[in-house]
Every structure is written in C-alpha cells, then in structure tokens.
Amino acid sequence: MQMHECDVLVVGSGGAGLRAAVEAAEAGARVIVSTKGVPGACGTTYTAASDWMAFGAAFGHADPADSPKEHWIDIMVKGGLLCTPDLARTIAEEAPARFQELDDWGGNFDRDDSGGFRQILSDGARYPRACGRGADTGPIIVTVLMDRCREINERGPGSVQFLPNTMMVDVVTDGGRVQGAWGVSMTDDQPFGVTAPAVVLAAGGAGELYAINVFPGGATGDGYAMALRAGAPLVNFEFIQIGPSIVHPINFALSGVFWRLKPQITNVLHEEFIPRYIPEGVDMDKAIFIKGVSYPFTIRNASKWVDVAVFTEISEGRGTQHRGVYMSLVHQPDSVIEEDACVPFEHLLKSGLDLRREAIEFAPAIQHFNGGARIDEQARTAIEGLCAAGENAGGQHGADRPGGNALADAQVFGRRAGASAASFTHAADADAVTDAARSGVNELVSGSGSEDAQAIRDELAWKMWQGASVVRTEESLTMALQAAEGAQGRLADARGSLRERAELRNLALLGRCVAIPARMRDESRGTHYRADVDAVNDGNWQRQIELRLDGGEVVAEVQEPIVLPDEIAGLEARLEG
C-alpha cells in the first residue's frame, strides 16, 4: 500500500481547503491536499455559478452604517438564532480582512467610483455588503489561493503538495488523537494512507444525497461522514439551503434579476401553476419579485410559496424530463434582457442558452449544507488534531445564512483551521493508518455485490429530494429516513468500485443525519419547513440538535437553548421578517 507522510492533511481543494493549506504552510508545515478532482479546477467554490457570487464583508463602503456588528446581527437573525454566537461573530469581524487579503494577493475585485469595493445587497442582509466580481468570484478565489500555494513552495518555510483524483475515506485516530487518514485513488481504485498528526476536513457538502442539486460531481459528504466516524459530532444538519437553479443543460443559480423581470413560469403542461399555491391575502407578483432577494428557500417571507409551488409540481410529476419547470423571459424586450440581466445573459449565452429566445428549465436545487462538524473558534472539532472548515464545519450557520456568508466563512475558518492544524505536532503512527486502511477495505468489499451501487444511490437521492427538501412532513421525512436506512442495509450487497461503495456508505449515513433531526424539529424555521405543524420559530426550539454515532446508529441530542450575548440580545422579534 502506498503511504504518504506530512504535518497537515487537508481534505478538499476548494476555497476553505486551499486557505487552510496556505495558512498551515505559512506556519512551516508540510501540507498534503487530497482532492477528488484537478487542483485549481474543482470544488464548489470554483464551479458554482450565479449572476453574482458574493463574499459578504462589512466594509461599509456602500453604506457607512454597516459594520461587523450589523453583519453579526444579520447572521444570527437569518440563522433563526441557531448559530453559535461566537462563531457567527468571528465571521463578521474577520471577513473584511480575509477579503482584503485575497484582493491584495491578486483578486482584483470590483470597486466603485470612490475606490472602495463595490457592494450590493444580498439576501438576509440589511446593508449592501456583497463583494466580488460577478459570476467569477469563486474561480478568482481559487486561482489566487493556488498561486499563493505555488509561491510558498518556492520560498518556504512550509510546502503544499497535492494528491489529485483521490478520495479520503476515513480519519485514523488512536488514543483520541489523529494519526492520519486513508483513502482511495480514483484512477486505479487502490487504497493508500497518509500519516499526519492533523487533518483538516474541507471536502464540501453532500449535494449528491439529493437528486436535484447544483454541486459538482463527487460531492458525497465525505468530510461529514469522516468526522462522525472519527467521533466528532455534527450540528444543525437538518438545515439545508435550497435555491431555484437551472437544471439543464447546465447548473446556474437563478437569483436576483430573473425574478425582477416578471418571469412566466409554467409546468410541462404549459400551465401557469403558481396562482394555485398562493394563499389568500398574499400578493403573487410580490412573492415572485422578492425571490430576487430571497434566493434560498425560506419561511420568512412570501417567496416561500413560489418554491413550494415549483417543488410540488415536480414532485407530483408535472415537471420536465429533466425534473424542472419552465421560466421564460422572452416576453421582455431584447434590450431589457441584454442590459438589466447582462451578467447572466452573457454567461448563459456562452453555454448555448439565449434568454431572449427560449425558456430555461429550473427546479429547487440543493445548494448548501448549513450544518457540519461542530467546531470551536479555532476551527477545531472534539477530536485532537481534527479541524473542519467551509461547508464541513458546523455551528457558524444556523437555520439559514445570509448571501455571501459561505465564501466569507470558508476564508475565515479556513485560515483558522490551517493555523490550528499546524499547531499539532505529536508523532503520528504509520502502522495505525495502515492497519485501519486494510480493515476498512475489507469492510467495504464484503458482501455479494448483487446490487448496483449507483442504482441504490439514485433511488435514495430522489426520495431524499421528495421527502427532505422544500416541503417536509412527518410522513415525508419517515420515507426519507427509511430510504437511507434501506440504502445502509443494502450496502453490503452493493456492486461497484471501492470508491463507489465508500461514497454510498457516506450517503446512506448522511441521509439519516438529515432526516432524523428534521423529523424531531416539529416547527418551521429558516430553511426547514414543516408543512404539517403550525409552530413557527417556536421559542422552545431555539436549540441546536447534535448528532453522534453510537455503534453505527445515529443518535440525536437536543442541546441547551442558544443564549444571545448582551450586545445583541432581543433579536427574537426580528425572526418573522
């Protein structure tokens, strides 16, 4: 078995993973980054697309009234008061420095006429603080950080090396300390090991748990599953951001301008169906319009009925063959589309979609997991030597998050995770890693191999989208949970490569991790809509749910109520709007 050795192993090469790698290497660590794709050209930070990829940072350039404290308040309120307050404050206070850092390293982000950063208003923010460079913000961040890694390799003191096309399977611990991890090469399906006293989990979300998602390929929640099996708990895992996105022939988030241009939305029968779902007293045109500043599904305003309508039409079989519905702007003059929607118009035109001439197919797509492995303010989990950042970290987001916080979070806690990881210097045991890898491989390859692993995944993914996405009920969540438990039970007989079986194992585990707390939380809050209960933002549910593994079973524990610091006390009244 091939073995590698380093000071810090980073799992994932997106914005969070690369920022962790840079920080650890700057501290003198020898860093290895394992990534499922090609470094610098994979991961959600690089591949996600919308009309404005935002980085939320309270510079106050667009409105001097904005400040990190105001950003902190927005994080807490949009999060349904279920964020860990100190983690949310850390993002708000450090985001400006991290964005400025990226710009200094070559980001060249958009600026206004006065020389300050251009800032626009995004969902969940009371002030314009979304910075970036249109749809290119994510790729720019990745490019800047890759360049930084090369620079460090040239000058030291540490180094950053990459293991492309590899899947890490499990963190190895001994005596409560990290010893490294083992994984699988995606080129030859052979196991390998990495000996390291510290591991940073930054592998991104579990988009492929759901049939309709905008994640890049390979997003099977590996970091979450690795954390759980290593003994680190997950938190807030019932909260998932779901946003309207083009589903064919490309993935593209439909935020902002699309909804302000009065789109015509029809099902496969060419029916304008949304009026059927709008309750009495709700202005349908307003509900559609405010989707422009409420991109992810939320219970907090009338835009929720648009998402419920689209979800229900698709779920009940009135969607297209690509599981979408139609949105058309062709009734608008060409000049309006070309000017008012210039960024998405140009981007989509390059992909062969002409908004002036044809409708697009869209659906509520899984876009971001708000929960993850519980971290402290230094991005450390409960396991010595194990850190998490980006989408794999939990606690900094709650029931929802403001637009721009994902990129900000990745840089803030990516940096902190790298610094923390570099501080672990205990001697790691290569034999422990080798033994764990051999045992793990034997576990994954046992069984008859009578069922196709991909078919099991596809069945699970559709039932998760139907039962545990936009509209949730006791019945639907039970269906999703049973599907995940069924997939877990069929794992031993799954036919596929070592990697495919490892991914299926992760997805079956994470399906339970979503459905169990979602079924427990019998209220609606943020992105979690329980259509079968009346309770909304129930004060008794101002609590996080923590998940652990006990003998292979997912155990959910309701935590003590979130207590707001004195300086932001009294925010409960803001949850309704």
Image (cartoon, rainbow, N blue to C red):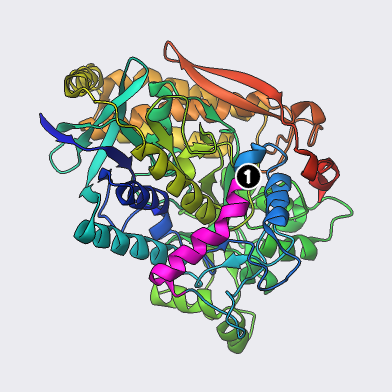
Residue flagged by tag 1: what amino acid is it?
Ala
**What span is in magenta?**
90-108
Of the pair 200 and 328, the residue shown nearer to us:
200
Of the pair 337 and 422, the residue shown nearer to us:
422
Whether 496 is drawn above or below 403: the answer is above
Residue visible at 63% across and 66% down in the picture: 59
Say whether residue 290 is left or right of residue 199: right
Seen as rendered, the residue at the extreme bottom is 335
Residue visible at 44% across and 62% down in the picture: 138
Whether 218 is drawn above or below 282: the answer is above
Quarter of the image that includes the N terminus:
top left
Of the pair 562 and 475, the residue shown nearer to us:
562
Say whether residue 34 is left or right of residue 60: left
In this figure, which residue is indicated by the disc labeled 1?
88
Q: What element carries label 1?
A: helix
**Place of residue 22 in the rendered image (x, y in percent of width and height, measured from the top left):** 34, 52
**Place of residue 103 in the rendered image (x, y in percent of width and height, measured from the top left):** 45, 69
**Place of residue 212 in the rendered image (x, y in percent of width and height, measured from the top left):** 48, 47
**Place of residue 194 in the rendered image (x, y in percent of width and height, measured from the top left):** 21, 33
Whether 409 is drawn above or below 464: the answer is below
Main secondary structure of the magenta stretch? helix
Residue visible at 60% across and 38% down in the picture: 239
**164 in magenta:** no
Residue 79 seen in the current view:
yes
Quadrant in the rendering for residue 503: top left
